[in-house]
Amino acid sequence: PGYEGMNGLPFLDRIEPEQVDILLITHFHLDHAASLPYWTERTGFKGRIFMTHPTKAVLRLLLGDYLRLLQMKNAKPEDVLYTESELQSCIEKIELIDFHQTVTVKGLSFYALNAGHVLGACMYWLEIGGRSLLYTGDYSMEDDRHLMAAEIPLKKPDVLVVEATYGVQVHASKNEREARFTGTIERVVSRGGRCLIPVFALGRAQELLLILDEYWQANPHLQKVPIYYASKMASRALRVYQTYSNMMNARIRAQMDVANPFHFNFIQNLKSIDVHNFDDSGPSVVFASPGMLQSGVSRQLFDRWATDPKNGVLIAGYAVEHTLAKEIMNQPKEVVTLEGRKQPLNCLVDYVSFSAHVDFVQNRSFITQVDPKHIILVHGQKDEMGRLKSALLLQHRQLPENKRPTITMPPNLQEVKLKFARRRSAKVMGSLADRDKEPQEGQGVKGIMVTHNFSSKIVAPEDLSTYTPLRMGSVSSKLHVPFAGSVDTLMLFLNEMFMGVTQNTDEDADDGATVFGLNEDEISVTVGKTKGVATVAWEASPANDVIADAVVALVMHSQSSTASIRLTSKPCRHPRAAEEEPASKIARDESTTTASRLKLIADSLKDQFQKVEAVYESNAATFEITTDCGHDAGAISEEGTLVCNVAVQFEDENGNNASITVECADKKLANNVRESLRNLAAAAGPVQV
C-alpha cells in the first residue's frame, strides 16, 4: 500500500518464473495477492495456483476495485500492472483447495489449515522428500465475532515459517479493545463530531461492523446517529460473507439459522459517495476504504474533516510504513492533502488494534505448541523481528543445545540453507507384506524398489502393475559361439569357474544335445544341437549379463587353451619309465577340480614350511608339516621341531565346500594355517551364482 505501480511489486526480477511449479495464496489481502495477475499474465510463469474458495471470490472483487481506482486516478500506463482481461484470465487459472484436502504436485504434498485472520485465510502444511514445512501466512489465535482461531497442526514440522508482524508487542484483551473502540466513537459523535474509520472493504471491516451494530442496538441514545459503510463493494462483499458463513465460527452459524447476521439494523451501505455533496452537518460514523488513507473515499473524507477538533479518525488495524495512516499515528501538526496543500491536523487520532495478527504472547504460544526444529521469521519490520528473535532465543536457552531450534530472520533475497540428516524408508507392499509372522530385524526382503515423488515402496515383480504404473518386461538374449571342443572339457571349465552348474540332455534335438544351466538355469549353454556352435541364452539382467559374458569367454577358452589341448589329445605311444614311489605319495591326476585344489594347497604349504608330506585319498588329503619355528616358544619340542597335521576334505570332485582342520601344539600357528588355507580354497574355488 505504500508504493504504486512497479515499485509495489515483490522482487520478481530475482526469480525465474519458468522454474516455479506451484503458487500458494494464503488469503486475499493486497500485500499477499495484488501482484498475482501480473505474475501469471506478464511473466513466463506456467505453474499452478491454489487458494481457498472464499479467497478466490473476494480476491476477484478486490483486484477489480483496484483497477477501478487506477482509472479514477488517471494512473500512468506504467503504473497499471494488468488489464481487466488479464485479471479475468488470471482468475480462471486458479485452482481451489478445501481445508485438509491433500494435493500432490511433482513430489510436493500440501494441504490447507484454517488460519483465522480473515475469511478463507489458511496456513499451508507442505511435505517433500520426507521433510515438512508449515507456512503460517497471516494468522490469528483469537476467536472474534465471526471467525475461528487458527488451527494447531497435529504434527510437528521440521521448518516453521511464521509471521512476526507485531514482534514482542502484546495486544490488549478483546473486551478492552472493543470497549475502547466503541467508547472513542461515542465520545466523538456525542460532541457533534464525525468519526472516520478507514478500513479495507473486506476483512476487519466486517468484524468492526458487527461490533458497532451490536453496540448501537444496546444504546438507544446513539441510534439517531447514522453509520455508513461507504464502499463500491459493500453489498457484494457482504454477499460473499453470507455465502461462506459455513466457514465461520459457531456463533455466526447459529445466527444464520435464525436471521442473517450481516443484515445490519443501524448500518447503511453506500455504493458510492460524493464527498463534496455528502451531508455531514451532523454527527455520523463512516467506514471508508482504503485502510491506509492513501487515496479514495477515506482520504477525501480525512482531508475534509482533519481540521475540525470535534471530528475523529480511528485507525483500527495495522498501519504500513510510508502511508498516511502510519504518519498521523505520530500526531503531526500538519498533513498534506491529495491536492498537495498543507493543512493543520486538529481532529482526534486514535489507534485501537483490531488487526487479526498474533501478538507476542500468542505467537510464542503457537511456536511452542508446534515445536519445530527450525524457525524462520518473516512478515515484519526488521526491528520488531529482531526483538522477537531475541525473545525466542532467550526462551529456548533453557533447553539442551541439541534440542534448541534454529531461528533466522532473513532479509529479502537472502537464501536460507538448512541441514537435515538423511532419512529414507520404503513400504513393503503386496504379497511381500502378506506374512503369517511379523518380520524380524535384519530379515532380508527381495523385491523391486520403486521410488516416485520421494516415496519408495518394495513390491514383488508380479505385483508391480498393481501398486505402481510400471509393467514387467524382459529381454531374452542369445549368442551363437563357434565351438569345436568336447563337452567334457567345457563342463570342466564351467565347473572350475562357477558353482551349481547343472547338466541335462535336450531330448528335442536329433543328436541329443547337452544343455548346461547356470544361476538357477537362468543362463543356458547348449552344445551339439548345431554342429560347430555353442548357443548361450539368458534373460537379460545386470547379473546375468556379467555371467553370460564370462561363459562366452570360457567357451572360447575351453577349445584353445593349453589345458584343453592336453585334455582332448591322445597320449603319446612312446613308453616312459615310471618313477618308483609309494602309491600313497603319487600325486593325483589333476584332471579334476578337486585334485588341482589339493595340489595348489600342497604347493602353498611347501613354499612356507621346510618339510611337508602329503597323503591323498579321493577328494581329501592330509598334510604333515614339520617346522623349526612357531609363535609360542614353548611349543617347540626338544629336537627343535614343531609338527602340525592338516586335513582337507572337499565335498565333491568340483572342488566345492572345503572342510579344513589343523592340529598343532602352537595354537596361533594352527589358527594362521587354517585361515590361510580357507582363504586359498575360497579364492581358488568356483564363483557362487
Image (spheres, grey):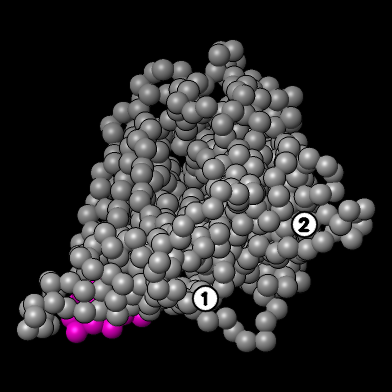
Left-right relation of 278 to 153: right
- Is label 2 or label 1 in front? 1
The quarter holding residue 206 reads: bottom right
At label 2, the amino acid type is Val
Badge 1 crowding class, 10 Å Cα cut-off, few under 14, some 14 to 19, many 20 or more, is: few
Depicted 91 relative to depicted 390: above or below: above
Depicted 165 relative to depicted 251: above or below: above
Q: Residue at x 70, y 45 (%)?
A: 485
Q: Nearer the viewer, residue 673 or 590?
A: 590
Q: Which residues are magenta?
A: 661-673
Report if residue 663 lies within the magenta region: yes
Q: Nearer the viewer, residue 101 or 545?
A: 545
Q: Nearer the viewer, residue 388 or 592?
A: 592
Badge 2 crowding class, 10 Å Cα cut-off, few under 14, some 14 to 19, many 20 or more, is: many
Residue 515 badge: 2
- On the rendered image, what quadrant is the C terminus found in? bottom right
Residue 618 badge: 1
Q: Residue at x 38, y 33 (%)?
A: 413
